[in-house]
Amino acid sequence: MADITGVCIAMCTPFDETGETIDDGRMRDYIDEILDTGMHSILVGAGTGEYAYMTEAEIRHLVELCCTHIAGRVPVAVQSTRMSTVNTIEATKHAEDFGADAVMILPPWLESPFDRGVIWHYEEIARRTNADIILYNTPGASGVEITTAMYRRLIAVDNVKYMKDSEGDLAKLQKFVAIGGKVLCGADPIAPYALMAGAVGWIWGSANIMPDECVRLYELITNGQLGEALELWKLMEPINSFLWSNDLDVEYLVGAKTAANMLGRNLGPNRKPQLPATAEARVAIEAALSTLPTNRIDPSRLVYRGWEEEQDWLVSMSNRRHPQIKTTGDAS
């Protein structure tokens, strides 16, 4: 049985400067950097990792690359969500073949079946794999809710061991905890409170930004040092709240990668159609990062960059992606 407790980073995927190619070397280096912080486990192909914008071949390559490089140093989970049951089983078996300890699977979310179809989907996948299954409840993104009644049915399946709950409803999370199984919080604003309420850990995109702080927060809470934990959380909360909800049109995965890049992690741009954070948004992110005790930006660096600079950046990226081709009659 996989031990996906503590802090499981929903890992960003490094791309080259065009955003169109996975940077294999940087991916390996990034894994090593994250493991040096004491991270407990890694999720490959997370939403924060932009798997939704990758081809099937790219996802499989990423899984093979990461599982091979991690090489059992920590438990590895892989998101094997696909739209059909057959395709999800194939992706699950591929992850398992390359050493994944667990797979995380969303309910079928486009033209979704009713509850009995969702339950059948998970039961059928469970019959075809030995890997532990992490249910994924994120109705705000998928439009499909795993209800407490569904969870009660699913957690009884032998290798359905965990659920990542990103709904953000602490009262409902406590109901899941009371039913049984192992609940992992995926809602940033309630992270410490979820752990205090019985969650066994987090699957956390923000761990790309503040891995040291996330690990320390887990240690403080599990050691019963709740006062110190909440003091640390006060410093972590600004960037977590910004990523979860903001008025600057910054999606979660854009905010997470932008912040990580600001801290020197060199993960490259997001893949289109996700657009880069505007200059105004970057200043807001910098301000939120300035409170972190370890992964912080010096407040003296908070300088507003105008729209002209943003336009220059977009033009330069476009030119790299679509270089001009000279014609025969071009005299230049």
Image (spheres, rainbow, N blue to C red):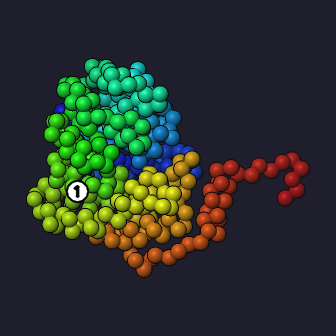
The residue to which callout 1 is attached is 192
Q: Where does residue 330 sit, x and y in percent of width and height?
A: 86, 53
Residue in the image at 24% along x and 28% along y:
154
In the current view of this chain or complex, which residue is farthest to the left?
Answer: 224
Residue 267 appears in the rendering: no
Foreground of the two, 265 or 12: 12
Residue depicted at 88% across the width and 56% down the height: 331
Q: Residue at x 18, y 33 (%)?
A: 1
Q: In which quarter of the image is residue 97?
A: top left
Amino acid type assigned to the residue bearing label 1 in the image: Pro
Against 124, residue 54 (above or below) is: below
| Residue shown at 36% from the left, 60% from the top | 241
> Quick one: 16 or 304, which is closer to the camera?
304
Mark 1 surroundings within 10 Å by alpha-carbon count, few (fewer than 14), some (14 through 19), many (20 or more): many
Left or right for 43, reference 281? left
Where 141 sits versus 1, above or below? below
